Amino acid sequence: MKHIARLSLTIAAVASLTTSLAHAQAVRTERNMSLDLANQLAAAGVAACAADGYAVTTTVVDRAGTVRAVQRADNAGPHTLDASRGKAFTSASAKNATLAMMENAQKNPAAATLVHIPGFLLVGGGVPVKVGNEVIGAVGIGGAPGGHLDEKCALAAIDKVKDLIK
């Protein structure tokens, strides 16, 4: 009888410990994009492309792909709003640059199916924003005459705020 009581107590202790560990892992702390950082990135993206003579829209999303900031340059086409949002969402979701994803999809038939994911836009111009190796959001730019040029502006925007995301 004593043996059964000890066994019961041991099982209860293990179950309690397992439950405690599960609860400890149930809540996570994540870094995310602040509104101030998003606004700075959006302004820097529009400015970088304007310096090269391109009227673009920059959309900045947080780690979940939710829009945090949008800036549309004077004379940027109306289509640039959806394009920049799609690029930012895709980049944040996949944690990768959309130009690299597009190039991979062109070479790899299995990756080509990514275009069928709702909201994904595999065109250059979406770049993840990282703190170390952790993606906290993404910048999407649309409106320059080529996705590689949109990406260049997005990278310039991220470079402009690099001291804030160390």
Image (spheres, rainbow, N blue to C red):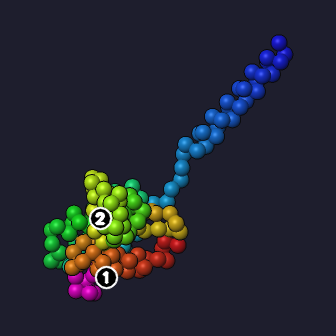
Estimate the x, y position of residue 18 in percent, counting from the top left.
66, 35
Q: Which mark is residue 48?
A: 1
Specify the principal SS of the magenta part: helix
Chain part drawn in magenta: 46-54
**Figure quadrant of the N terminus:** top right
Estimate the x, y position of residue 121 in percent, counting from the top left.
27, 62
- Rounded to the nearest whole Å, what is the CA distance between mark 1 and mark 2? 22 Å
Estimate the x, y position of residue 83 in percent, counting from the top left.
23, 66
The residue wearing badge 2 is 122
Quick one: 126 or 63, which is closer to the camera? 126
Q: In the rendered view, would you say 6 is above or below 121?
A: above
Q: Quadrant of residue 25?
A: top right
Amino acid type, label 2: Leu
Quick one: 118 or 107, which is closer to the camera? 107
Q: Residue at x 48, y 73 (%)?
A: 164
Q: Nearer the viewer, mark 1 or mark 2?
A: 2
Amino acid type, label 1: Ala
The answer to whether residue 12 is seen in the rendering is yes
